Amino acid sequence: MNDNGRWLLKLIEQNPSISQNELSKLTGLSRSTIAGYISTFMKQGQIIGRAYVLPKKNGVVSIGGANIDRKHQIEKELHLGTSNPAKTYFSTGGVARNIAENIGRMGISNSLISVVGNDHEGKWLLEETIPYVDIEHITTVPNASTGAYSAVLNKEGEMVIALADMDIYDEVDIEFVKRKWGMISSAQMVFLDTNFSKEVIQYVLSRCKEEMIPVTVAPVSAPKCEKLPRNLSGISWLIANKEEVEALVGMKMTKQADFFKAAEQLTQRGVERVVITRGEEGGFFYSKEGTSSILLPPRIKVVDVTGAGDALVAGVIFGHINGLNPIDAVGMGLACSCITLQSNETVSKEMSKETLQEAFKMYKEGVNDGKVD
C-alpha cells in the first residue's frame, strides 16, 4: 500500500461516512482515483460495505498445518532393527491447529486457515477442533489425505524420530490466501507456521508487514526453515528450537555465547523478538533492543514432550495480546508448555485461562526464589 492509500484509510477511519467527493477535496486526488482505491480496499477486506466500515481487530488468525498425530512411546530401552513394546496414542495435531486450540482454550477468539482431506481423519479433526476454533476457513480437499505426523518417543517421553505426510499442503497457493485476506486483516495477531510453500509464506509476511499486522512465526522443523526468506522484517516473534535456529543462521550452537550470536543475527535480519527453546534447559530470549535473558522452566515430571513447543508459542501470544512485557510473555509461554509436558495429549485438556494463570504464578514464584533465571 502506498502513501495515498494509507492516507485515505486514515481519513475513512476518522469519518466512516465520508463521501468520495469529500475525500477528493481533502487529498487532491480525482474522484475516479478515489473510487479505484475504495474498490481495492473492499476486495482486500480493508473496509466492509458501502459505508466504509473498517473491520474490528479480532483475536488471532493461525495459518498452517492441521494434522493427525500418532505417537508411539517405547516402554523399555529402544532397540533398532527389531520390534519394541510400545503404547500408541492418537490425537489431533498440526502446529497451527495446536496453537489455535490452545489459544481457544485460553478464551481468546481465533480462526484457523488450513486444509484437510475429505476422509475420516479430516472429518474427525474438524469435529475435535470446532469447540475452540473458528473452522470456517479450513478447506476440505477432495481426493486428498489429511496431513499425518507420527512420532516415536523413548521411555522418558523424548522424541527419537518423527515422520510427516504433508502432501496436502501443496494445495495451498497465494490465491487461496488472498481469498481469506479480509479475515486475516482483522487479526490482532497472525500466527504462521512453515507447512505451506515458500511463496505463500513470503506473501503472508510481506502483506502483514505492509498492513502492520503483528506476526508470530514457528518454523515447524529444521528442513522447513529454508522456506523462510532471508529478510525477516515484519516478524514480531520468531519462536524456534535449537536445531531450527541452527538451520536458519547456518551455524552450530554449542555454548551460551552462540545462542546470543544466533539471536542477534536474526534480529539483524528483521525479527523483533527471538525465543530459542532448549528442551529441558528452557529457553533463550533476545530482542532487537539488545535485551536478553536465559529462561529455565520450573522442574516438573515430563510425561510427553509432543506439543510443548506449540503450547509455548500459544502462551507467548496470549501474553503479548494481554499486554505483558516480552519477558513475562515468554514466561507465560514456558508456563503453558509445562501444562502440556504433564499430559499425554498434544494439547492438554487441562489448558484454560485459569490453569495457565496459576502455572504462570508458580513460574514467577520460581523466578523470585531463584529456581528460574
Image (spheres, rainbow, N blue to C red):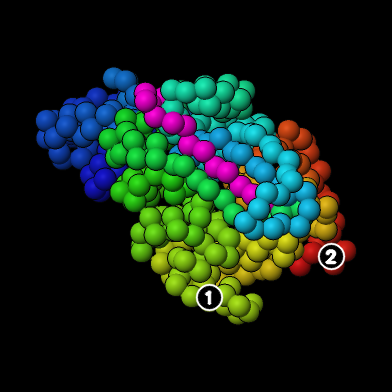
Q: Which amino acid type is shown beneath numbered disc 1?
A: Lys
Q: Which residue extends farthest right?
A: 369
**Residue 371: x, y in percent?**
84, 65
Question: Is 63 or 184 nearer to us in this picture?
Answer: 63
Question: Is 332 or 16 nearer to us in this picture?
Answer: 332
- Relative side of 53 to 272, left or right: left
Residue occupied by mark 2? 371
Residue 94 on the magenta span? no
Residue 151 on the magenta span? yes
Whether residue 334 is visible here, answered yes or no, is: no
Q: Please tell me the numbered disc located at residue 231.
A: none
**Residue 15: x, y in percent?**
35, 29
Q: Where, quadrant-wise, is the N terminus in this rendering?
A: top left
Residue occupied by mark 1? 252
What is the spatial separation of the Cα atoms under label 2 and label 1, in whole angstroms?
28 Å
Q: Is residue 244 above or below residue 360?
A: below
User: Which segment did they paint magenta?
Assistant: 140-153
Q: Secondary structure at mark 1?
A: loop
Q: Residue at x 64, y 45 (%)?
A: 307
Picture quadrant where residue 42 is located: top left
Whether residue 179 is visible here, answered yes or no, is: yes
Q: Residue at x 25, y 42 (%)?
A: 5
Q: Which residue extends farthest front?
A: 82
Mark in front: 2 vs 1? 1
Q: Is residue 237 above or below residue 61?
A: below
Q: How many marks?
A: 2
- Relative side of 365 to 175, left or right: right
**Residue 163: x, y in percent?**
53, 48
Q: Is residue 144 above or below residue 232?
A: above
The local crowd at label 2, few if under 14, some if 14 to 19, many if 20 or more residues have their Cα within 10 Å, is: some
**Residue 181: x, y in percent?**
35, 34
Q: Secondary structure at mark 2?
A: loop
